[in-house]
Amino acid sequence: ENRWSLHGATALVTGGSKGIGQAIVEELARLGAKVHTCARNQQELDKALLHWQSLKLDITASVCDVSSRTEREELMEKASSLFQGKLNILINNAGTSLYKTALDIKEEDYKFLMSTNLESAFHLSQLAHPLLKASGEGNIVFISSVGGFVGFPVSSVYGTTKGAMNQLTRNLALEWAKDNIQVNSIAPGPIITPLLLSYFDAKDSIRNVENMGVPLGRAGEPVEIATVAAFLCMPASSYITGQVIVVDGGMTACRF
Ligand code: NDP
């Protein structure tokens, strides 16, 4: 067995048409996994699929809004039929943010963030459990955030979804260890994606990215999260479970 390969593994990655999810999909496929992904926007998904076909990567995709319970069930049925009921990897990546102060958050805003970021990750993990168990070697990776550890302005509910996700990581790791399912989480710092750029558009200048108190002196690239996600799914990391790995250029090293 090659400890540094994903050859023959099957993977479901949510939110793969852009940003961090897209980089994870590509990294897993390059390392030999068969990957299925989803997003809400069909056109962007089709564009990504064309790109992956040109790279000869084994990637399929379908439209799914992970904030919908029925759509999550349909997504897992799709993955199950594609991979004959066996899944090695579930990456709960789809997520979003609203840049509003706590007092400006409306009831719909709260529900939208909770269902998109947290309920989706919990329910998809539940739905994936039989498939992960059947594969014999299962891995769940949550894409959390440094916002789940430290406070940032205008992200109270976002930070809450990610803090809860960090705790969910430890609980599921404990419950599902007997089924040989490892459960870990990655907490990225600022990563250059459409989501981060939309925040800086809102705050005038992308130059702010360079001024975020990151000791490495720059924002991260999506691939710098994707490589860690791939590692967590490889036999190389077979003794790591229940952990939240911070990947933030040192941003929170001086804040705990
Ligand atoms: P982007 O907005 O750039 O990309 C998000 C991806 O998820 C897109 O493919 C999007 O496609 C999809 N998506 C969003 N909502 C849904 C939904 N309801 N159902 C299905 N797919 C969905 O975000 P990032 O790549 O920046 O973020 C990915 C994850 O990383 C998120 O969980 C985010 O919280 C986390 N993160 C990001 C950081 C950053 O600095 N960028 C920092 C820390 C954490 P579509 O819109 O078509 O649905």
Image (cartoon, helix red, strand yellow):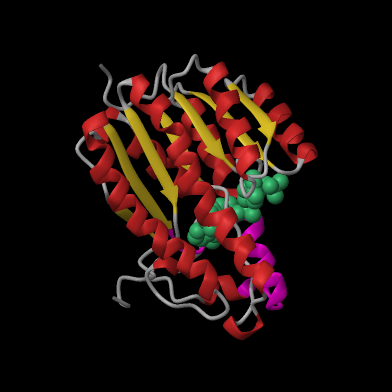
Give the residue displayed 64% in from the left and 36% down from the top. Answer: 38
Task: Out of 63 and 54, give the one closest to the viewer.
Answer: 63
Task: Out of 246 and 220, give the one closest to the viewer.
Answer: 246
The N terminus: image quadrant: top left
Task: Out of 231 and 249, give the one closest to the viewer.
Answer: 231
Q: Which residues are magenta?
A: 188-207
Give the residue displayed 71% in from the left and 78% down from the top. Answer: 204
User: Residue 164 occupies which quadrant of the picture?
Assistant: bottom left
Kindly tell me whether residue 138 is visible in this rendering: yes
The C terminus: image quadrant: bottom left
Task: Out of 227 and 16, give the one closest to the viewer.
Answer: 16
Q: Against 33, is 89 above or below?
A: below
- Is 69 positioned to the left or the right of 226 in the image? right
User: Residue 22 occupies which quadrant of the picture?
Assistant: top right
Is residue 196 a member of the stretch shown in magenta? yes
- Is 184 positioned to the left or the right of 111 in the image? left
**Residue 145 horizontal/vertical position (percent):** 45, 61
Give the residue displayed 47% in from the left and 35% down from the top. Answer: 127
